[in-house]
């Protein structure tokens, strides 16, 4: 193992153990650990008051009109420790975090509606880039589909990050748990990340 890889491995362990200790970080067995693959698990509660989409294209038959196929959007939310969310909690109606003392990071998501836009009932509903900001300029980025189905896992690709994740590759398993008080999604993540 070269010096840079050793430093990155140490930095990942340090960050996970001290900076973002609320994120469950563990090896996925000896085989994955030997490959330098770590697992991060956490929940995300979208702040629906921060969800903004374009004026077109929209489904005009909905009141008010809602995003149709091809509509771009951006949104934000709160990162919580694993198992904080039950599918309907995490954000107060005014957009503030329901559990402010448990917030361990910020989630930002941008993308486009696919399928039948907000009318999609199963399968891919949006295709997105997600940024998991874990503080102190330590972040991960993933790309992929998000499904309309509740409790169905979908895999996303890890495309990079910052800090100890600057060379990160891997996959993020995302599960939609439900919707919170702001109409935002509650999500659960299991991210397998190779850092060197």
Image (cartoon, rainbow, N blue to C red):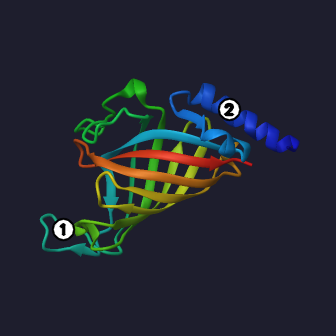
Nearer mark to the viewer, of 2 and 1: 2
Residue shown at 59% from the left, 45% from the top: 139
Residue carrying label 2: 13
Residue shown at 43% from the left, 31% from the top: 103
* Percent position of residue 134, x then y: 55, 38
- Viewer-proximal residue, 169 or 31? 31
SS category of the residue bearing label 1: loop
SS category of the residue bearing label 2: helix
Judged left or right of residue 164, residue 70 is left
> Tag 1 or tag 2, which sits nearer the N-term?
2
Q: Is residue 88 above or below residue 18?
A: below
Q: CA distance from mark 2 to mark 1?
A: 47 Å
**Residue 65: numbered disc:** 1
* Percent position of residue 39, x then y: 57, 42
Tell me, yes or no, whether the two marked residues, 2 and 1, touch with CB atoms within 8 Å.
no
Judged left or right of residue 144, residue 31 is right
Within-10-Å neighbours for mark 1: few <14, some 14–19, many 20+: few
Residue shown at 55% from the left, 40% from the top: 40
Q: Is residue 180 above or below residue 53?
A: above
* Percent position of residue 151, x then y: 32, 51
* Percent position of residue 96, x then y: 31, 35
- Viewer-proximal residue, 187 or 19? 187
- Residue 194 visible to the viewer: yes
Quarter of the image with the N terminus is: top right
- Viewer-proximal residue, 1 or 164? 1
Judged left or right of residue 183, residue 36 is right
- Viewer-proximal residue, 126 or 58? 126
Residue shown at 43% from the left, 35% from the top: 82
């Amino acid at each position: 193992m070269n010096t840079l890889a050793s430093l990155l491995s140490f930095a990942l362990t340090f960050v996970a153990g001290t900076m973002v200790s609320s994120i469950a970080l563990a090896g996925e067995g000896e085989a994955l650990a030997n490959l330098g693959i770590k697992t991060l698990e956490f929940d995300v509660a979208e702040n629906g008051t921060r969800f903004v989409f374009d004026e077109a294209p929209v489904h005009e038959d909905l009141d008010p009109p809602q995003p149709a196929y091809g509509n771009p959007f951006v949104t934000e939310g709160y990162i919580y420790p694993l198992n904080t969310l039950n599918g309907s909690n995490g954000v107060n109606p005014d957009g503030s975090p329901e559990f402010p003392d448990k917030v361990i990071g910020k989630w930002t998501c941008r993308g486009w509606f696919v399928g039948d836009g907000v009318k999609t009932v199963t399968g891919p509903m949006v295709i997105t880039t997600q940024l998991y900001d874990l503080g102190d300029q330590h972040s991960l980025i993933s790309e992929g589909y998000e499904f309309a189905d509740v409790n169905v896992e979908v895999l996303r690709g890890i495309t990079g990050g910052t800090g100890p994740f600057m060379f990160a590759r891997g996959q993020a398993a995302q599960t939609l748990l439900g919707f919170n008080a702001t109409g935002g999604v509650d999500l659960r993540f299991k991210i397998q990340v190779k850092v060197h």
